[in-house]
Amino acid sequence: MRLKKVTVDSEKCQGHNRCYAMAPGMFKVDEYGYATPRGDGVLASEADIELAQRAVENCPERAIEIIEGEG
């Protein structure tokens, strides 16, 4: 089975918080607005994948990515 995860490139993230707004509950932000995935970033359902894709499409810095791996 192919496991999907959402990741945030901390070098690219500029703290716009669009991911936080577009995918509620999927990301957490620090005191400066920089995002990281909650937990391990695993996308457990089609709904999670759709939310993550919305975050990917709305990140102005292209810092968010959905990756596939073995699971």
Image (spheres, rainbow, N blue to C red):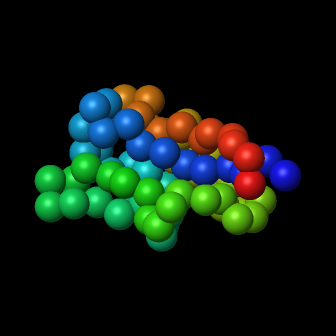
56 and 45: which is toward the camera: 45
Residue 5 locus on image (x, y percent)? 60, 50
Is 31 left or right of 12, judged from the image as shown?
left
Mark yes or no: residue 60 visible: no
Residue sitting nearer the eye, 17 or 27? 27
Q: Residue furthest front?
A: 70
**Number of labelled discs?**
0
Name which quarter of the figure residue 46 lies in.
Answer: bottom right
Residue located 53% across and 58% down the image: 41
- The relative height of residue 71 versus residue 47 in the rendered view (above or below) is above
Identity of the residue furthest to the left in this view: 32
Q: Position of residue 37 (x, y in %)?
A: 44, 57
Q: Is residue 62 left or right of residue 35?
A: right
Percent position of residue 52, x then y: 59, 51
Residue 60, picture quadrant: top left
Residue 8 lies, in percent from the top left, at 42, 43
Residue at 15% from the left image edge and 61% from the top image edge: 31
Q: Residue furthest right?
A: 1
Q: Is residue 28 visible?
A: yes
Q: Nearer the viewer, residue 61 or 1?
A: 1
Tell me the quarter of the image containing the C terminus. Answer: bottom right
Q: Is residue 26 above or below residue 17?
A: below
- The answer to which quarter of the image holds residue 12 is top left
Q: Is 7 in front, or is 27?
A: 7
Q: Residue at coordinates 39% horizontally, 49% vertically from top-left? A: 18
